[in-house]
Image: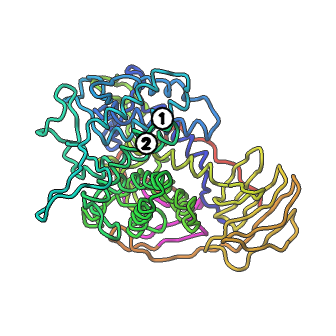
Amino acid sequence: MRRYQYFDPADMAGKALNYLTGMVDEKEGFLPYWLILPNLKPAEAAHCRVDDAELVGSWSEGLDACMQILGTDQGSEVLHGLETHLRSSFGPMGLRYHRKYPWTHTMHASFHEMGYILPALNRMVRRYPEDQDIREKTERLVRGMRQLVIHRQVKTFWSGDTREDKPIFEFPNDVYLLDGGFDLSCHTGRGEQPIRHAVLIPGLMERYLDTGDDVALELATGLANQLLGPSRYFNYRYEFFGHVHSAVWAASGLVMLSDVTGDRSYFSAAKGIYDYVRSISSSFGWVPEYAQWHPMNEEHCETCCIKDMIVLADALIRHGYPHYWEDILLFSRNQLVENQMNETGYVVVDNTRQDQDGKTWHDLDRRMVGGFTGGSLPNSISLSKFRSIAGCCAGTAPLAVKLVWDRAVTEEGGTYTVNLPFNRETDAWKMESDIPDRGRVRLTLKKEGRVAFRRYPYMTEDVQYLVNGRPCAYDTESSRIVGEHLPAGSTVELRFPMETIRKKETVAGGEYTVSWRGPDVVEMDPPGEHLRLYQRDHAKEKVLPRPEDVMFTGAANYGPTQQSRPDA
């Protein structure tokens, strides 16, 4: 029988841990390398300004997530280094800047980057509740940003003046210079300031929920009102032109804001944003980096966007929309997995070069394993594309892996529901999955309770529910298959037919034939160039880039063992 690749979040976390602890500069206090150039001969990694501006925040969160999944202290030294960076370089108005490096130029703080810094600081406040220094830095950051916004209070129109009945906040510029404050002759050039600044909303709401900080809530509310009102960023269906990562990330904060304020319009906006982005994404989780900026055939998939969609889908599920479980299932098992670097045998390595001028060359084949791409096609990753491996995605993607890990099986009222089938064991249950080889999922209870399986469209009507190997009757409740109460030690198994189904789908402006086995894409036609994706049939050899594209130097020496699979 054919064997296919199994979905293994722990393996993904192990590889991500390899990247996050290996692609750092020990001489600079474990400062990350954002820029990775695998297509050069030899390959190199280089520092740039964002390493000490955004990445020290996102990588500390991502690394912590990997360590929690794996239950390991490996990486603690690097995590401490990232946190040390996070504690430093605060300046005017409580903003976090960065140190002066040979590769930096204009010294400034970007409000979009504070969207990465604030959640990392929130995490440190929770991690070190007695640390007065980090509490004060977080508080000053929030208050400093609140002081810097323009508060729009009066609308002057041709018919007269009216008072704004809601707080409306916006920053005068997207950068704040270390020595010059708001200098309107300087800007990031990204544009879209309302949505770029709205990524602060999730971190601000998280701080409010953690500490009751009313200033954080006020700032989040004002930024949300500017985004959904005067900015005119969204149309009435919440379609937009621009950065998908920022829009979906901000929407997760709108859900929290709706919960706190009771204003349902924020939730409606969040759901509308999700549904629009879902409409321009693929069934298997290819999410465009931008909406309506390029022709769709010029778009690529940034892994940050997949993370945002998984996080927001989970928020919608918690608010009474269980059908979004299917999106989490398909997105996580497919494009999220494929966007991680597993094959690096094509990388040309020169271990004779010494690190210098902010660049590194040694062992890049090994160190690159576990990174995530910032720009994939549905069937391939172009090694020569800028951000073929992206520093931003390396820090954010593990947050999606952690969410999937945590939400695989949920317990409520003594019922354990299998939402996302893969191999995992806790002190309450052990889950084993044969998907996509065959349609079989098992849950062994270590505590008494009922067992439910979320029912997905790939499961036919011919489903068997077995308890300790014997077929049993089951009920259907809220798209779940639910059995009777069982004692500890019981094993419940769900069986269903599994076959390969081929479907045509238009993605990124092209038509693909997608081969599905249950929730897993096992093959994509036409196959891609350079680093091919969805080569999941173990009977086939992995297709590496052609020799004329890159030179081969042998396989990387990193390779965590595949998690054991249940016997047939």
Q: Residue at x 32, y 44 (%)?
A: 39
Q: Residue at x 45, y 52 (%)?
A: 257
Q: CA distance from mark 1 to mark 2?
A: 8 Å
Q: Position of residue 338 (x, y in %)?
A: 48, 55
Which segment did they paint magenta?
A: 514-541
Mark 2: which amino acid?
Gly
Quick check: can you spot residue 545?
A: no
Look at the image and say whether residue 529 sits in the magenta stretch.
Answer: yes
Specify the label residue 122 is tagged with: 1
Q: Position of residue 558 (x, y in %)?
A: 54, 38
Where on the picture, by quarter, is residue 108?
top left
Look at the image and say whether residue 268 sits in the magenta stretch.
Answer: no
Which quadrant: the N terminus?
bottom right
Badge 1 marks a residue whose secondary structure is helix
Q: Which residue is mark 2?
A: 203
Label 2 Cα crowd, 10 Å radius (few <14 / some 14-19 / many 20+): many
* Nearer to the camera, 191 or 352: 191
Label 1 Cα crowd, 10 Å radius (few <14 / some 14-19 / many 20+): many
Which quadrant: the C terminus?
bottom right
Mark found first going from the N terminus, 1 or 2: 1
Asked whether disc 1 touches disc 2, contact meaning CB atoms under 8 Å apart, the reply is yes
96 is higher (above) or lower (below) than 531: above
